[in-house]
Amino acid sequence: MANVYDVGQYITELVPTVDTMKLYKLCYFSQGWKLAWTGCLLFQEPLQAWANGPIPVALRDRSKPGGDATNLTTTELRTIESVVDFYGDKDSIELSELSRGKAWKEARRNLPDNAHSQEILSVTTMREEFTDLLHSTPNVPSCPPGALIPENYSLETALAAIAEIEKTWGGTLALLATR
């Protein structure tokens, strides 16, 4: 799994002139859309609910991301590219406004928008928020091809899973098929 430094590094390679706030928001949106598309995290480092929206505080503590984009899988790269393609023309202020969704509000627990907070965003709530956007908003980033299939998934893995399902649930499925 990538870390936030690798994600930030790749974003700076895609958008060399990216300012810090925009970098933070693109990391946040990359994490959110990866959760919506796959149910899996893009990086483990938490996001804090700051006044200007979610901040990957681990990345904030560095002057440059200093990660290595070669640590990213093809799916992770394509996820980040899709997010940058979709949000890249927006400025930091607009991205900050867009990032103040359900997970940010929940973490802040009704604090005024400009109040200081270091509360951590819930990954579960982020997944719900972005999944809701996926199903309710017509204009969202494009899910990268292959993102829904784990990269280490093989035909052998699929066949073994099918065999296990048939072994465990075969009788029940056969009974349900006759109803």
Image: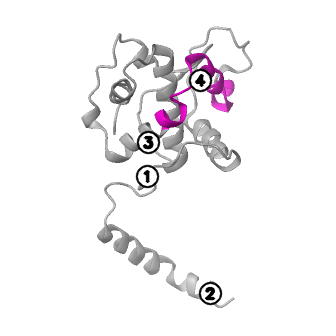
Which residue in the structure is indicated by mark 4?
95
- Upstream in sequence: badge 3 or badge 2: 3
Work out how far the residue at label 1 is from the one at label 4, CA to CA, in angstroms.
24 Å
Question: What coloring was used for the rendering?
Answer: one colour
Q: Residue at x 31, y 38 (%)?
A: 72
Q: Is residue 101 magenta?
A: yes
- What predominant SS class does the magenta segment belong to? helix
Which residue in the structure is indicated by mark 1?
147
Work out how far the residue at label 3 is from the one at label 2, CA to CA, in angstroms.
38 Å
- Residue positioned most to the bottom: 178
Work out how far the residue at label 2 is from the one at label 1, CA to CA, in angstroms.
31 Å
Crowd class of label 2 (few under 14; some 14 to 19; many from 20; radius 10 Å): few
Q: Callout 2, which amino acid?
A: Ala
Please tell me whether mark 4 or mark 2 is closer to you in this view. 4
**Magenta span covers which residues?**
83-106
Q: Callout 1, which amino acid?
A: Ala
Figure quadrant of residue 160: bottom left
- Upstream in sequence: badge 1 or badge 4: 4
Which residue in the structure is indicated by mark 2?
177
Which residue in the structure is indicated by mark 3?
79
